[in-house]
Image (cartoon, helix red, strand yellow):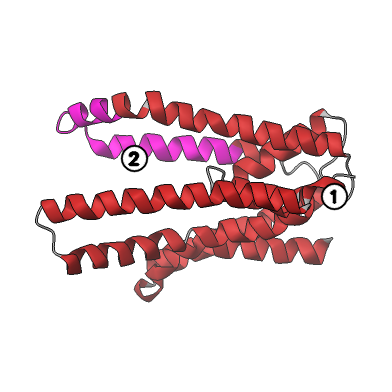
Amino acid sequence: MYTEVANQSWMYAVAGFILLCVLAQTLVVMRKAWVRARELGVTPAQCRKGIAVGFGVSFMPTVSVLVVLLTLIPLLGGPLAWYRLSVIGSATFETTCSKWAVTAMGEELVLNGYSINAWIAAAWVTTIAGISNIVWMAFACKPCDLAFNKMTGKVDLKWVGILGTSAIMGIMGYLSITETRKPNNRTIFLVSFAASFAISLLIKYVPALKKLKDWNLSISLVIGMVAACVIF
């Protein structure tokens, strides 16, 4: 079984080393940003406030990732799930890639229910597929940024937002259909979707609850997981 390798100490050592490298890069970038901000005349108090605000804004969305991490640890092992979701992975991406990889091996992504070969396939698929993000950022993001800057003032940016929203809706619509073929999965999806929709209405019509906007995904995921526990 995959558990024979997935949670060994050397796996934790490898994942920990990679995460230390990522943390070092983060600190280097933060230091460069601080130095550049001071050169531009930003006061230390403003810099500290910016760091605090950035930490708060970035911390809230990670709650949903933490929930998925706790879900994937039994399925993929602690080191692999921890490494993937802490570097360049995402909740939906890692879950979907792992499931497709294990399914392609003729097995099913269930707890203690697939072989070490299927686990290796999931590890390679998630890692190699994640590299595409780095390649895209290295070669395509800068030209896209230059093109976007040229569009500023010439194109109504409202349509850019509409295009991005439409793309996300298309992806979520596809996943909603393909991942809800089983009745139980469909019920869990409907419960989570209803929770997200209800929270969105509360945010829109109750000004005091606007702070829930950043927590919408996290709350919906938790409610969906509770529903899954009840159903299964």
Position of 120 relative to 39 (above/below)? above
**Outermost residue, left side:** 41
Task: Classify 10 Å Cα crowding around label 2: few (below 14), some (14-19), many (20 and above).
Answer: few
Q: Is residue 178 visible?
A: no
User: Where is residue 101 drawn, in percent x and y?
Assistant: 75, 32
**Residue at figure coordinates x 69%, y 47% from the top left:** 80
Check residue 161 for magenta coloring. yes
User: Where is residue 54 drawn, in percent x and y?
Assistant: 34, 60
Helix, strand, or loop for circle 1?
A: helix
Question: Main SS type for the magenta part?
Answer: helix
- Given residues 111 and 193, the one toward you in this image is 111
**Residue at figure coordinates x 85%, y 40% from the top left:** 108
Label located before the other in sequence (1 or 2): 1
| Image quarter in which the N terminus is found | top right
Q: Do the residues under discs 1 and 2 have CB atoms within 8 angstroms? A: no
- Which residue in the structure is indicated by mark 2? 161
Position of 209 relative to 131 (above/below)? below
**Residue at figure coordinates x 14%, y 33% from the top left:** 153
Question: Of the residues shown, which amino acid type is indicated by label 2?
Answer: Gly
- Which residue in the structure is indicated by mark 1? 3
Task: Classify 10 Å Cα crowding around label 1: few (below 14), some (14-19), many (20 and above).
Answer: some
Left or right: residue 204 versus residue 10 is: left
Q: In the image, which residues are magenta?
A: 145-173
Q: Where is residue 109, by image quadrant? A: top right
Q: Is residue 231 visible?
A: yes
User: Where is residue 106 drawn, in percent x and y?
Assistant: 87, 30
Question: Of the residues shown, which amino acid type is indicated by label 1?
Answer: Thr
| Image quarter in which the C terminus is found | bottom right
